[in-house]
């Protein structure tokens, strides 16, 4: 079985469309397990629309002002 590092490396190599397909698959799996509220689902959809439209900024881990 692949390690988390191997999976992360493979994910970073995905084309945007395939990344969205993977996201949808994981989201469906989590929804089945966690039973997300409609409000949360709508919030996630708005976030993905923002990403698709380029209305985001990338913060590097450890950068000044980064949340991590």
Image (spheres, grey):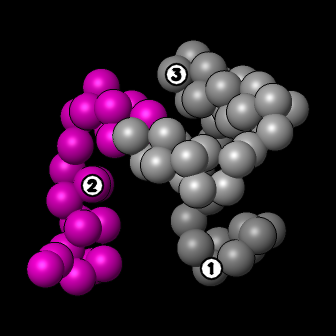
Which residue is found at the position 74% from the left and 44% from the top? 36
Quarter occupied by residue 20: top left
- Label 1 sits on a secondary structure element that is loop
Residue 66 location (% of width, % of height) = 73, 68
Drawn side of residue 3 relative to residue 25, left or right = left
Task: Say whether marks 2 and 1 touch (CB < 8 Å).
Answer: no
**Closer-to-camera residue (63/10):** 10
Say the numbered circle drawn on residue 11: 2
Residue 17 location (% of width, % of height) = 30, 25
Q: How much space separates mark 3 and mark 1, taking CA atoms?
A: 25 Å
Task: Please tell me which of labels 2 and 3 falls first in the chain.
Answer: 2
Q: How much space separates mark 2 and mark 1, taking CA atoms?
A: 21 Å
Is 20 within the magenta? yes
Is 18 within the magenta? yes
- Read off the residue under disc 3: 52
Q: How much space separates mark 2 and mark 3, taking CA atoms?
A: 17 Å
- Read off the residue under disc 1: 62
Relative height, residue 24 to residue 33 (above, below): above
Drawn side of residue 15 relative to residue 61, left or right = left
The span shown in magenta is 1-24
**Closer-to-camera residue (6/51):** 6
Q: 10 Å neighbourhood of mark 1: few (<14), some, or many (≥20)?
A: few
Which residue is found at the position 47% from the left and 49% from the top? 29
Quarter occupied by residue 48: top right
Q: Quadrant of the C terminus?
A: bottom right
């Amino acid at each position: 079985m692949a390690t988390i590092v191997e999976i992360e490396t493979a994910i970073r190599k995905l084309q945007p469309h395939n990344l969205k397909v993977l996201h949808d698959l994981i989201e469906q799996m989590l929804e089945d397990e966690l039973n997300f509220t409609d409000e949360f689902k709508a919030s996630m959809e708005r976030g993905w629309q923002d990403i698709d439209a380029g209305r985001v900024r990338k913060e590097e881990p450890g950068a000044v002002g980064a949340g991590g």
